[in-house]
Image: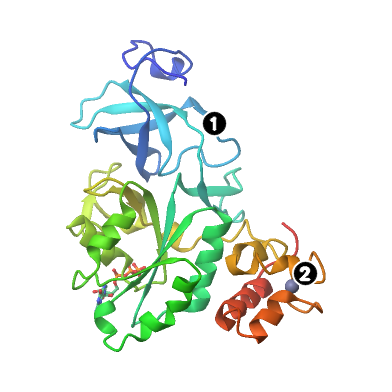
Amino acid sequence: MVIYNATSKMNPDETAGTRSCALPACMVVEAAGAFYMAESPDGTIYRCRTIPLTKTENEGTSLVAVGDMVLLRLSPGEGAVPEAVIVTVLRRHSALCRKRDIRRNRSKEKVQVIAANIDQLVVVSSAFDPPPNLRLIDRYLAFAESEQLEPLLVVNKADLDPMGDAVRSMELYRDLGFRVLHLSAKKGAGMDRFLAALDGRVSAFSGHSGVGKSSLINRILGQQLLTTSRTSIRTGKGVHTTSRSVMLRLPGGGHVIDTPGIREFSLSGISRENLRFFFREFLPLMPSCSFSSCSHTVEPGCAVRSAVSTGLLHPSRYESYLALYEGLEDGD
Ligand SMILES: Nc1nc2c(ncn2[C@@H]2O[C@H](COP(=O)(O)OP(=O)(O)OP(=O)(O)O)[C@@H](O)[C@H]2O)c(=O)[nH]1
Ligand SMILES: [Zn+2]
């Protein structure tokens, strides 16, 4: 590992390449413009920025994103929060990206990293108001599979489901082996199981507007972090955290991230050719299709379609597959 001198007296911009002792790798927990907050394993927060010589082990994408592990070097500062420069951005094991709108963005990066090093995608829906949207859930699940993120299905507002309708509509996911939790941010139901599922991991929250993502995060953190203002690292004024990227540390370990960017993730890694690999129940059937490249839409001798007609595959999942397939383009 490359280690840098935390106590160098040289101009920090000139010393990025020097090797010597220093801070352990820190996690970027907040990004706001040119500034970042990075957290060391012991919980110390550093206010930091990049320098022209900042190195990255991830070429061709955003230099720094929330969730990145970075090597820092302390720089002189008078504020209460220690200041540092980011010397190296370490290799990411995963990255949630969105395509940049070239017309509205002059940056050379075509892909923007919304969050790095995510372990699991929490797909939040609600039992009622709005009711579960299975098309949307399947879209998130396909995305999670394509990014090799472990999905966790959460159905919030269980207090609005006295007849168990939402529980029944989600049964198919349990049958497929997905983890499904029915919770109520309002009443606190199921929170122990939820916390256990988040423990020690970096989890990104996704889901339709109004399902209660912020309410769930506030409930598990025991405070109103996502609706009340926190002090901006740039201006010192209060800001709404939901408009920025913030990684929140859970009391028992682990982190959660909830950003508008993840809510509107793109399916950039999914094409018509590879979509079928992200519906896990198709995999054992696919070798029985007459054509090895079967798209499971119109081909004769398709084992997937045959399984739908005999009730072996859930029609709702197949409908989602077709809807996603229609919306995708050929090729990668
Ligand atoms: N009955 C009930 N209402 C809830 C529950 N959780 C959240 N709500 C309500 O649902 C509404 C939306 O909650 P939010 O936490 O803002 O939802 P969100 O998913 O963060 O919404 P966006 O920020 O628009 O993406 C609010 O009026 C909450 O009070 C719950 O468990 N039960
Ligand atoms: Zn087929």
Q: What is the CA distance from the residue labelled 1 to the residue labelled 2?
A: 38 Å
Q: Residue at x 51, y 41 (%)?
A: 93
Residue behind label 2 places its C-beta within 8 angstroms of ligand 2: yes
Image coords of residue 9 (percent x, y): 33, 10
Residue at image coords 68%, 62%: 271
Is residue 49 at least partly visible in the picture? yes
Answer with left or right where residue 81 lies relative to residue 326: left
Looking at numbered disc 2 in the image, what kind of residue is underneath it? Cys
**Residue 79 located left or right of residue 17:** left
Q: Residues within 10 Å of mark 2 (few under 14, many from 20)?
A: many
Above-or-below relation of 299 to 261: below
Q: Give the numbered dot on residue 57.
A: 1
Apparent side of residue 36 relative to residue 57 in the rendered image (left or right): left
Q: Position of residue 228 (x, y in %)?
A: 21, 59
Would you say the beta carbon of the disc 1 residue lies within 8 angstroms of ligand 1? no
Dot 2 corresponds to which residue? 294
Q: What amino acid is found at the position of numbered circle 1 in the picture?
A: Glu
Of mark 1 and mark 2, the one earlier in the sequence is 1
| Residue located farthest toward the top when viewing the structure as drawn | 9
Instruction: Classify residue 151 by image quadrant.
Output: bottom left
Q: For the residue labelled by badge 1, is the local secondary structure a helix, a strand or a loop?
A: loop
Residue found at the far bottom of this picture: 163
> Which quarter is ligand 2 in?
bottom right
Q: Nearer the viewer, residue 177 or 77?
A: 177
For the C terminus, the quadrant is bottom right
Kindly state the secondary structure of the residue where label 2 is placed.
loop
Return the mark for residue 190: none
Q: Nearer the viewer, mark 1 or mark 2?
A: 2
